[in-house]
Amino acid sequence: MQLLNKRPESLLDVTMHYCPGCGHGIVHRLVAEVMDELGIRERTIGVAPVGCAVFADVYFNCDMIQGAHGRGPAEATGIKRSKPDTIVFSYQGDGDLASIGMAEIVHAAIRSEHITVIFINNAIYGMTGGQMAPTTLLGQKATTCVEGRTVKQAGYPIKMSEMLATIDGSVYIERTAVNSAPNVMKTKAAIKKAFKNQVDGKGFSMVEILSMCPTNWGTKASNPAEATKFVVDGMMPVYPLGVYKDADAVKK
Amino acid sequence: MAEKKLMKGNEALAEGAVRAGCRFFAGYPITPQNEVPEYMSWRLPQVGGAFVQSESEVSAINMVYGAAATGVRCMTSSSSPGMSLKQEGISYCAGADLPVFLANVMRGGPGLGNIAGAQGDYWQATRGGGHGDYRTFVMAPNGANEMANFPHKCFEIACKYRLPSMVLADGIIGQMMEPVEFMHPEVDVKALKEPDWALGVNHGRAKRIVKSYDLREGMLELMVNERVKRYRQIEAAEVIYEEKMMDDAEIAIVAYGTSARISVAAMKLAREKGLKVGLFRPVTLWPFPKARLAELSKRIKKFLVVEMSLGQMVEDVQLSVNGRADVYLHARPGASVMTAEEVYTTMESISKKGAKEYATAK
């Protein structure tokens, strides 16, 4: 008999708090598999965000730090500059990265920090109960825009990958999704490249991952299967998948 | 005997921090502390350290939060408006028991205020400043020489008790040039033992987590109370103050930093005129030397607090003497500096019988 698949060593056997149909668990597993495959678990330091993934410090089997909302890239900067032989990743949601932490993520890219950023875009604030995110789609309902997001009231959804790709310091920026098995496989490849870039000393890498939030997406999409459809029909037209930047190392 | 050098207060502080083992600095420009990041930008690379000019003070303190978590001695510096921005991060450092060193070269406030020296951040520094229950070890230098030497003590306390420590200076002390002498031997960072909580390459040990939260019922209280034990140890063992001409004093001036320097001159004026005045200078603002002031208040019945703020430290003096003596205040907020003559005039008026307590100068 042959063991074909098992829990990655980089992911601890603990009960996760994520809701049914949420994408965080999938992405956690992918990050852990990549850490295993690259053999970097024992020198990796993860930065947990504020938001749904706040307990990521418990789940990953590597050194972890949990800090203030949106400041992950700053914390990662302090860690990487102090311990250059470590592999540092910041795991962030859309409120964390694209709203309160906008300055930190942009400037980490500008400085081409040698870090890896995993950015979960589910177009909503999950942990606080479904408020409008900077990535909430026009017309999408949230508890702070009950009739749907309007341009007049809240402006437009922010496209982080497109924006960060314009920055010279960004080495690798890709947007993927975890709505289907093929996309999960593509996401894993992107995460692996983003970590490999750091191992190779190339500079700032980020993977933006479109993910499901059945709990906070409202009546129809509260069915996990329907939620994966919203990723395709709702999010992908606004947030097209693809590689937005893939440059060689920025000399530091 | 170490060599004497003529240095600016801010540069002396930066060099003192490097000699105390600081190997990471993140900061953002703000007057009147700019010499600190400027100095660090070329000095840290010389000793294998890292310097980052951050995009904001918010980012700077969070970089320091990350650096401290790896066990590296690290610091950030700023001036009043910038220190306000750092408060969230300082609270996280306190909540995660991280040793970080902070320097606030105070300027006039509130708001943008001005860029002259002031002491209006006393409450912010000594009461925590950020959210939640915590303490910061705070030292108040009175000149460039103490700027050079206090970082050593601040790192020592921060690392021993695992809390943020701070030098609370002001624009005058930061900008003045004076002879300084580095009294402490340079810290050999390679000889420092890596803390058993530091993040890094783990060589097969169990994972470590640096965090400030605990959502389980009752657990956060345990976490805070464990910290409170260390605060009590600091209060018992780490109080520093200085006394001048206190043996026969009938009036005690209580002042720190620049105010204390001016008060020395005022005290001399008063002594020349026959008033028995002494100076009590708190060097640690937290822990505040309340036990010594309580003891002094059994004998001395008039305390004059002199501060370049609206009357902040005066409350600590009142708490310390606890009604055993009259407490007076000579306050100059808004980055105005008192003269020795005006402090003397206040002393003269309070030396009279029936003087109104807690009077301000103007």
Image (tube, grey):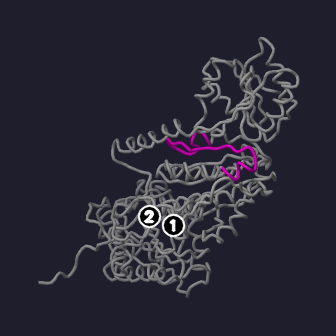
Asked whether B241 falls inside the magenta stretch, the response is no
Q: Name the amino acid, label 2.
A: Leu
Q: Please state the extent of the stretch shown in magenta in the rendering.
A: B125-149
* Pick the front one: A179 or B203: B203
Q: Is residue B288 above or below residue A60?
A: above
Q: Quadrant of residue B51?
A: bottom right
Tell me, yes or no, if residue A171 can be seen here.
yes
Cα separation, mark 2 vs mark 1, equals 9 Å
For the N terminus of chain B, which image quadrant? Answer: bottom right
**Residues packed near mark 2 inside 10 Å, few (<14), some (14 to 19) or many (20 plus):** many
What residue sits 61% from the left and 33% below the top?
Answer: B289
Q: Are marks 2 and 1 in contact (CB under 8 Å)?
A: yes
Picture coordinates of residue B90, whole percent (x, y): 56, 51
Q: Secondary structure at mark 2?
A: loop
Q: Is residue A143 left or right of B259 when viewed as pictured?
A: left
Residue shown at the point (39%, 69%) measured from the top left: B202
Q: Is residue B102 above or below residue B250?
A: below
Is B81 on the left-hand or right-hand side of B218? right
Residue at image mark 2: B199
Q: Quadrant of residue A32?
A: bottom left
Q: Is residue A220 visible?
A: no
For the C terminus of chain B, the image quarter is top right
Q: Residue A91 location, x and y as percent?
A: 44, 67
Q: How many numbered discs, if any? A: 2
Q: How many C-alpha atoms fall within 10 Å of the one at disc 1: few (<14), some, or many (≥20)?
A: many
Judged left or right of residue A8, residue A128 is right
Q: Nearer the viewer, residue B209 or B151?
A: B151
**Disc 1, SS:** helix
- Residue B147 lies in the magenta stretch: yes
The residue lying at 50 percent from left, 43 percent from top is: B132
What residue is shown with label 1?
A79
